[in-house]
Each structure stands twice: as structure tokens, then as C-alpha cells.
Amino acid sequence: MLPHSSTMADVARLAGVHRSTVSRALRDDPRITPDQREQIKAAAAQLGYRTNPLVAALMSARRSRQEPLYRATLGFVTKYPRERAAWFAREFGPLLQGATERAHAQGYHLEEFNGHEHTQSPARLSEILQHRGIHGLIIAPLHSIHDTVQLDWTKFGAIAVGYSLREVALSRVAHNHFTGLALAAQQARTAGHERLGLVLPRRVVEKVGKRWLAAFYLDQAEHSPSTAVPPLLFEEENEAEFRAWFTTHRPTALLCLNAAVL
């Protein structure tokens, strides 16, 4: 039985030529004589070698002296109900805009797909993406760690933004939450504030793997216990709860996400 994992290097060894000669022969490059082309193609057939079309397209683009106007379409997968469209635009609109601009600069088109519209049929979103010829995905942050995106992940190359998608082992790109809050606390203290208060929704604390909370506690541990303020972590925004916490602990600076807290 012929092997199906043969490489170009295997063909080159069997034909007694360099790999670059094999590549040219399989593209019918006129620099390779007809006899040698046939010899190399026979060796490739004997080994069951098949050119990878995606690799071939990449190499063709690299050899071209002109930048291609269009390479492929990438999917930007979000998940939120229509009534939360304003929330997504506020929280992650700049992320989508930046990804779109960067993709365009590299010759790609980026198209948003809302996974919430296909929750009743998880396979449907995978089918739509495949039918559109989309192989690469960017997974936007989810509302909480209890949410997920259901896809046939074996069909796509994907990267997640942030840590909220926990059920799938993907490469990720994320803000450095720990260092970010540590820097914010340092600047607040440099400005003369000693009693720092952290105010966050619990779902956000969980979404970032408690990195903000960890940096806050480390900052407190490095300063006088008399100035420590317990963080306010809430399920839902509650002004009475906030007022009671603020009146009791009197923080002089707040570290928070939502301007409504201020």
C-alpha cells in the first residue's frame, strides 16, 4: 500500500533532484526539461504525493511581485442576542473595527457571524462558515464564562480574544489584565491615593481569570493594612449596595470598568 504522507523531500530523494526542482516540475515550470518533469511526476505518483492546495496558494502569492487584492474571508464570531447589540458595540465595537482594518491591510475580508442566532442548531453555524469558504476564525469575548460557542472546531483554524471561552483549547490573544491593574494602582498611589477601591461585576472577575483581583490583592499586601479596602464584587449593579460599601470604607480612588460607578 502506497504511503499517503509523502513529502516533496521524499519525491526529491527518489528522483535524485533538489526540492526546488520538484516544486518547479510539478508546476510545469519551463525551466525544467520535459523529460525531467515527467521523471519527477512519475516519482510523485509512485509515492502517492499530492500537492497541498493551501500551501501552493500561499507560495504562489509569495512568488508574485504584486500584492493580491484579496486572499480570503475570515470569520469574526460573536455571541449576543439582538437586544444586546448596543452593549456589544460599546464593549467590543473597537475590537471588531481594529480586526477588520488589520485584516483588510493583509488582503483579507473579515465578516461577523453571530453565534447566538444559531444556538438551536449548533451545526448550522459550522455549515454556513464552510459553505462561505471560511477557514480562519476570530472568537470575540463572550458575555461570561458560562457561555460558549459550539462549532466543529476540527474544520477551522481559530484564535480567541480573552479568556471567556473556556471549553475549547484555543490559542488566545488577551490584554495583560494583571499588569494593567497593577499599573493603574501604582499611578493612583503616585497621585497621592492610599485607599484604593476595586469595583467589578463578578462575571467580569471570572472572565479574566481573577487576574485583576489578584493584582489588587498584591497591591494591598505591599502597603499598610490600615489603608486596605475590601473589593466590591457585585452580581448586578445596585446603587444601595455601592453606597453602603463606599460609606463604610471611604476609598479615595476607584478602580472600575463602568463609568456608571463614578
Image (cartoon, rainbow, N blue to C red):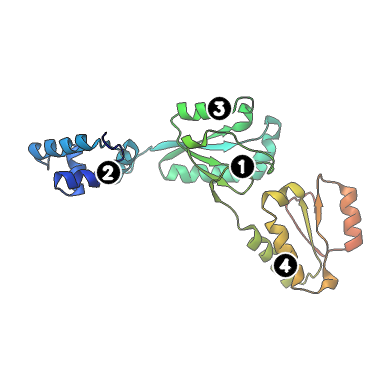
Identified at 29% across, 44% down, the residue is 59
Q: Which residue is mark 4?
A: 218
What residue is shown at x 86% (from left), y 46% (from top)?
Answer: 238
Point out the frontmost of discs 4 and 2.
2
72, 231: nearer the viewer: 231
Foreground tag (4 vs 1): 1
Tell me if 137 is positioned left or right of 116 in this view.
left
Residue 253 visible in the snapshot: yes
Earlier in the chain: of badge 4 and badge 2, it is: 2
Task: Identify the image quadrant of residue 227.
Answer: bottom right
**What type is the residue that disc 4 sits on?**
Leu
User: Which residue corresponds to mark 3?
Assistant: 123
Between marks 3 and 4 in the image, the one whose residue lies nearer the viewer = 3
Single out the residue that lies furthest toward the front: 1
- Dot 4 alpha-carbon crowd within 10 angstroms: few under 14, some 14 to 19, many 20 or more: few
Kind of element beneath mark 2: loop
* 10 Å crowding of disc 3: few (<14), some (14-19), many (20+): few
- Name the quadrant of the C terminus: bottom right
Distance from the alpha carbon under mark 3 to that under mark 2: 34 Å
Q: Earlier in the sequence, mark 1 or mark 3?
A: 3
Q: State how far apart marks 2 and 1 are (Cα).
A: 35 Å
